[in-house]
């Protein structure tokens, strides 16, 4: 029996990207709505992207099929 190729998770591919050093970059959550109660400083911090945590790194690379 031939082993099938693993499909990449298209949602993950659109939301995450691999940096030059091999880390995974992602956008921060909680910026979609209910922004009136959040301080400008907090919203400013949510604009910036961040690096994915070590615990999820391997799993996300596998789902992105890279």
Image (cartoon, rainbow, N blue to C red):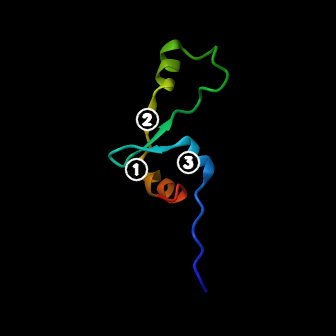
Give the quarter of the figure containing the N terminus: bottom right
Mark 1: give few (<14), some (14-19) or many (20+) Cα within 10 Å.
few
Which badge, 2 or 3, comes first in the chain's sequence? 3
Q: Which residue does the image show at 51% across and 43% down from the upper left? A: 16
Closer to the eye: label 2 or 3: 3
What is the C-alpha distance between the residues marked 2 and 1? 12 Å
Q: Position of residue 26 (x, y in %)?
A: 49, 39
> Going by the picture, which residue comes out furthest to the right?
34
* Quarter of the view holding residue 7: bottom right
What is the C-alpha distance between the residues marked 1 and 3? 18 Å
Mark 3 highlights which residue? 13
Q: Position of residue 12 (x, y in %)?
A: 57, 48
Height in image: 49 above or below 65? above
Mark 1 highlights which residue? 54
Mark 2: give few (<14), some (14-19) or many (20+) Cα within 10 Å.
few
Height in image: 22 above or below 26? below
* Quarter of the view holding residue 35: top right
Mark 2 highlights which residue? 50
Mark 3: give few (<14), some (14-19) or many (20+) Cα within 10 Å.
some
Which badge, 1 or 3, comes first in the chain's sequence? 3
What is the C-alpha distance between the residues marked 2 and 3? 16 Å
Secondary structure under the numbered disc 1 in the rendered image:
helix
Height in image: 22 above or below 42? below
Residues 23 and 42: in front is 23
On screen, residue 44 versus residue 38, left or right, reads left
């Amino acid at each position: 029996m031939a082993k099938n190729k693993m499909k990449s998770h298209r949602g993950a591919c659109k939301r995450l990207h691999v940096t030059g050093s091999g880390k995974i970059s992602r956008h921060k959550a909680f910026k979609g709505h209910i922004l009136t109660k959040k301080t400008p400083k907090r919203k400013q911090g949510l604009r910036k992207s961040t690096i994915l945590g070590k615990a999820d790194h391997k799993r996300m690379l596998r789902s992105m099929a890279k």
